[in-house]
Amino acid sequence: MTHIIPRRLLLGSALATPMLAQAAWPERPVRLIVPFGGGGQTDIVSRVMADALQSRLGQPVLADNRPGGNGSAAAEAVMRAAPDGYTILIAGIGTNSGLNALLYRGITYEAERDFIPVGCFCTTANMLLVHNSIPGQDFSQVVAWIRANPGRFTYASASVGAITHLVMEDIGARLGLDMLHVPYRQSTQAMTDLLSGRIHARALGLPEGEAVRGAPTVRPVALTT
């Protein structure tokens, strides 16, 4: 994930240099716009980031969840905000690249044109959790079951085009697996359905995966990097 700021914000800051000499930033609360719902990987690391920034800056830093469109709703919210340095986007692969424009209608921003990346604050592996209704003690045995049952294995992601969706699509393409993707709007609902067995699997970042790794109904079978 990349922490990015609108290009117009940087231009505005440059034009306001004389004012910046008199007034330090920030003078009031800062909002981090989080592109996914509460409880997921992006939400977890964004709130850790917000706490760290708040301690360092001496001003409240608020995590504001704006799920929808694989980060597009959050990006649009930042584009509509005043270019004053107090609204910052936490972005993932969908908003950093042109991927969302290929997957969703009505995208009005272009990442390379409208945003400038200013830093990467988190990289993480992905953990593949599988419900215990799927037999197999390791990844190869789970793969063998999927091959023997084409089209029956279901996996969840936070949205179409999310990194956890792409991870599973990559696994399927490399191994020639026929799996059914079930996209969710809220990470918490996807986790609830995985734990109950309504879906069979989910790839998720380590911060979120570690929180449920010991649950009695699921087990980790692989890590991706």
Image (spheres, rainbow, N blue to C red):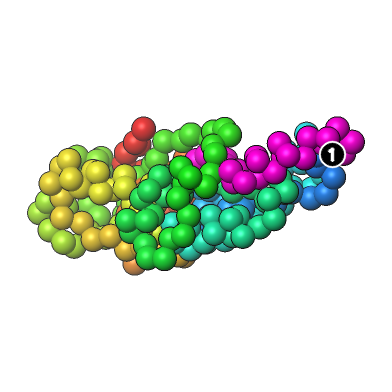
Magenta-colored stretch includes residue 119:
no
Residue 60 appears at what percent x and percent y? 79, 48
Q: Residues within 10 Å of mark 1 (few under 14, many from 20)?
A: few
Residue 93 appears at what percent x and percent y? 42, 45
Asked where in the image residue 37 lies, by quadrant, the reply is: bottom right
| Relative to 221, 80 lies left or right | right
Name the residue located 73 percent from the left edge and 39 percent from the top edge: 15
The residue stretch that appears in magenta: 1-24
Asked where in the image residue 151 lies, by quadrant, the reply is: bottom left
Name the residue located 46 percent from the left edge and 42 percent from the top edge: 112
Of 59 and 105, nearer the camera is 105
Name the residue located 37 percent from the left edge and 65 percent from the top edge: 105
Is the residue 115 above or below the residue 197 in the image?
above
| Relative to 38, 52 lies left or right | right
User: Mark 1 belongs to which amino acid?
Assistant: Met
Q: Is residue 165 visible?
A: yes
| Relative to 120, 83 lies left or right | right
Is the residue 148 above or below the residue 112 in the image?
below
Asked where in the image residue 101 lies, by quadrant, the reply is: bottom left
Name the residue located 43 percent from the left edge and 60 percent from the top edge: 107
